[in-house]
Amino acid sequence: MHLHVASAYSLRYGTAPPRALAARAADLGMRTLALTDRDGLYGAVKHVLACRDAGIRPVLGVDLAVPAPEEHASGARPARRSRPSAEAAHRIVVLADGPRGWASLCRLVSAAHARGERTRPVATRELVGEHAGGLVVLLGPASDVGRAVAERDRDLAAARLAAWRATAETVLEIVDHQGPGDGFRAARMLALAREAGVPAVLGNAVRYLDKADHPVAQVLDAARRLAPLHRRHLDDTTGQAYLKPIPLMRRVAELACGADAADELMAATLRLGDRCALDSPADLGMGALHLPDVAGDAHALLAARCREGLARRGLERSTRAADRLAAELGVIARKGLAAYFLTVADAAALIRGRGIRCAIRGSGAGSLVNYLLGIGDLDPLRHDLLMERFLADSRPGLPDIDLDVESARRLEAYEALFDRFGRDNTACVSMMETYRARSAIRDVGNAIGLPPQEIDAIAKAFPHIRARQIHAALHDLPELRQSNLSQGRLEVLFRIAERLDGLPRHIAMHPCGVLLSGGTLRDRSPVETSMLGFPMSQFDKDDVEAMGMLKLDVIGVRMQSAMAHAVAEIARVEGTRIDLEAVPRDDPATYELIRSSRTLGCFQIESPGQRELLGKLQPRNLDDLVVDISLFRPGPVNSDMVTPFLEARHGRRAPSYPHPDLAGALGESQGVVVFHEQVLRVLDVMTGCGLSEAERVRRALGDEEGQREAAAWFRAAALARGYDEEVVERVWRTLTAFGAFGFCKAHAASFALPTYQSAWLKRHHTAAFYAGVLTHDPGMYPKRAILDDARHFGVPILPLDVNRSAAEWRVEPASRDGGPGGHGIRVPLSEVRGISAAEVSRIVEHRPYDSLGDFWHRARVSRPTAERLVLAGAFDALYDLRPAAAQAPAPAAVGAGSAPAAPAGDRALGAPAPAGRRAALNRRDLLCRVGALDRATSRPPTG
C-alpha cells in the first residue's frame, strides 16, 4: 500500500529498520510495501528479505535530491553548495518496475553519487532520463512540481510536469500530513493530475513506524542539519509521517479528493504497487552466483591448473592427493564454483606479483585446491585438514577465502585488483556505522541546545557501549552513579539517545571486503565513492552474500608488514634474499626459542598467557603450534580443557576417549575436542552420515533450536549403529559444550605458519625482526617493552641521528666492546613527536648536513620539529656531543680559529666550531641556535 517509505537506512532521517516496517505492514494487512530510502539503496536487500519472511511483496525505489531547474537547465554540473541549500533541494521518488527497473535504478543511484559530492548525490531530470528504462517517477510535495503547486503557480507546475513526462513515466504523489497548506496542496496536486491526464497515487512519505517515534525523527533532522531543534529546521512538524493503516490512509484520500474519488485513488495506488512489486528475490539476482567471467571452460581450466599444482608441490605420485583432488573438484563442479577459485587464485597472484606478502587465512586453508593453485602455502594433507569445513555440498552460498596482506600495502593490493578486474566490475564492500552511546549523546545534546563543552564532558563520561545501555550504565557503574548525570534535565537527553541505538549514522568502507564480479555488477549493486576514492557498493557483507556476489576479504595484517620489512632489511644489509615460504619448518633453533617462551613480538604467541602455555606445552613442530593457538581461547581456558590435555601430552595420565572408536578422531588432542574438524569426524564415526552432512549438523549447534533438532537426529542415528545410550549422551554433551569455544583447525594452521615465520626471523635475523616489529607495531606491547627485549637479545639501539636515521627503523652494523659486532637498529625520524611525513622526506632527501644551520636552510622543518630533534639527540653525532655533556646546563661560546672559517652569520646560526677550537656545546646551546635561526629567517612553518 505505501509507496514512499524511508527506513533507518535513510541516514539520520528514517527511524525504523526494514524488518520492523515489513512486519508492521503485514500485521496491517498490506500486500505490498515499498522502500524508498533517501540517497541510496542501502536497505534494499534487507527489505526484500524482510518482506519475504513477512509474506508480503516488496517494492524498491529511491528518494533523490534534484536541484532547482535553473541550476541544471544547461546540463552543467551544479555548483557545490552549502548543506542548508542541499537540504532545501527538490526531491523525487523513483520506483523500479521489475528486473529491468532494478538495473536502471542501480545505475541511476550510482550516477547521482558520481555527479554530486560524497554522501550528497544529485540527480537531474536529464540524468533520470538517461536511465529511465523500467523506472516510474513519483512527484510529491517536495518535488519541483509540488513546490510550484504550493506557491500557487499553476502554469509553472504544469510546465514542470510536462518536462518530467517527456523524461520518464511520471505519477503524482498525493500526501497530506495535516500541516499548514497540506490539504490545499494535496487537492491541487490531484486536480493537476486530472487536468494533465497523469496518474495519481496516495502516499504518506513514511519515515517512522509509530507516531511515538516523531521526537526521534525531529532529533535526526536537527542532527543532520547541525542545528538546534526548531520548527524551521524540521522536515516534519505534525507527527503524521508514520506507517498508517489502510483505513487511515483512506481517510487521507477522502480529505484530499472526497469520498467518491477516494476509491479510485486507493485503487491506483494498489495497481502501481502490484505492478512494481518484485515477484521473488530472484528479480534482484538473488539465488544465483555472479562470478567474474572466465574465458573458456572454467572447470576444465581449474582442473588443469590443479594438475600443474600437483607437480609443482611434488604430489603428482600421491594417490591420496589425487583422490582428495577428485573429491574437491567434484563438489566445486556440482556447485558451479570453478570461476570463483580461478578468480581468487588470480587475485592472490596479482597481489604477490606486486611484491606484497599474501597468505591465506581461515577454513580455506583446508582445501587442497587452494594449496595447488597457490592461494595458500599450507598442505592440508600434511596437517590433516578437512575440506568440508570450508566447502561441502551441504554448505549454502559461496565459500569464504580470506587473504592476509601487509597492512601498510593493503590499499596497493586493492589497486592491483581494480586494475586487473576493472573499476566497473570491482567495488569495495560498505558497512554502516551506527549510533552508540557517545555519538547518540552528542547528536541529541546538540539538538536540544546544550553547550558544546557540556556535551563533550557528558559523552566522555560513558564507556564505549551501546546507546540502549545508557541508563543501565548510569545505574551500574559507580563513577556514573556518583556523577549525578541521571538527575534533572539530562533525563530527556538520555531517553532520546537510547532510542537512537543501532540506527545507521553514516556509511563507511569495510576494512577488508572487495567485490569481484563480471560486467553486470553495476546492474545489481549501486556504487558510490569511498573516502579513499575507491568505488564502494552500497551493500554490506551480509547483503552481498545474499546477492550471490564474490566477496574477497583482503585483510591488512601488521605482522605481515613487519616480516616484509625485516626481509627487506636483510636484503639491504646482508645482500641475502629470503623467501619465508621456503624456510624449513622444522628448524630446531626456532622451536628452542619458542619453547623458551621468549616470544615477545612474535605473531599470536607473545601475550603473557600464551608464553605461559608455550612453556607448559613445549611445542616441537608446526602441529604443536596449531594446538597451542587453538587451546589459548577463552572457552578452553575457562573450561580447564588445557590441563587434561597437557597431562595426557606429557604422560602424566592416559588419554581418555568417550568410546574407543573415537581414538582416531581425537588422538591428536589427547581425547580433548579442540577443533571443528574433530566434531565432523566424531559425528561421522558415530552416525555414518559423511563429513558433508556432519558439517551441516555442526553449524546447527550454534542455536538452541538447531541443537534440539540435531540432538534428536544424533541420538537416533548413533543408537541405531549400536552405541549405548550412556556413550551417546556423553558424546553429545561434549559436542554441545564445544559450541561455546570451538576453533577451526584450518584457521589455527593458517595462523601457525606466520607464527613460526616470525619466530624464525627473531631467532636467525634478530635485528631485522625488531626493525620490522618496531616499524609496524603489530603486537600488544608498547615500544619500550620491545626495545627492552631487543637489548636482552643483544641488539644495540642506535640513537637518533639527523644524518643516519631514516623514516622507519633500520638495521645497521654495530660495534661491541670497541670491536666489530653484529647489527643494531637505528631510531627513525618518524619517532619524533609531531614530525610530519613531508618533513621526514625532506630531511632524508637533502642530507648529509654539516651543521644545524645547513640543516635548517635545506630541510626546512618547523621550529617545533627542529627543537624536538635537538632534544632527542639527532644532532649529537654531528656536534660530537657526549651523552653526559649533551644536557650540560652551561652554554659555551664559539670562537674563531686559525682554520678556514665559515661565514660569520652561518657559524653564529648553528655551524660547528672550527677544528681545534671547538668549545663544549650542549643541547641547550643548539636550542638557542634554533631560535636564532627561526628569527633570522622569519619563514612560516612548513609541514
Image: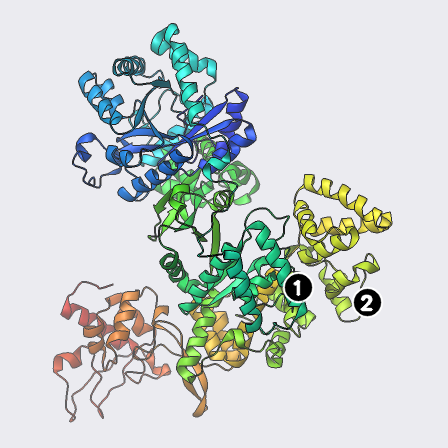
Seen from the viewer's position, the closer of residues 222 and 662 is 662
Res 52 seen here: yes
Q: Residue furthest top?
A: 260
Amino acid on which disc 2 is placed: Arg
Q: Quadrant of residue 837?
A: bottom left
**Residue 931 screen position, x and y as percent:** 21, 70
Q: Is residue 851 positioned above or below 522 on the image?
A: below
In the rendered structure, the answer to whether residue 851 lies left or right of residue 103 reads: left
The disc label shown at residue 323, or none: 1
Q: Secondary structure at mark 2?
A: loop
**Residue 192 screen position, x and y as percent:** 26, 15
In the rendered structure, the answer to whether residue 230 lies left or right of residue 736 reads: left
Distance CA(mark 2)–CA(mark 1): 38 Å
**Which residue is at 15% across, 66% downward?**
938
The residue that mark 2 highlights is: 653
Q: Secondary structure at mark 1?
A: helix
Quadrant in which the N terminus appears: top left
**Residue 59 screen position, x and y as percent:** 44, 29
Near mark 1 (Cα within 10 A), the count class, few <14, some 14-19 or many ≥20, is few
Q: Is residue 788 positioned above or below 440 on the image?
A: below
**Which residue is at 40% across, 37% downward?**
41
Q: Pointer 2 and pointer 1: residues touching (CB < 8 Å)?
A: no
The disc label shown at residue 625, or none: none
Q: Is residue 103 positioned above or below 760 on the image?
A: above
Q: Is residue 934 positioned above or below 720 on the image?
A: below
Quadrant in which the C terminus appears: bottom left
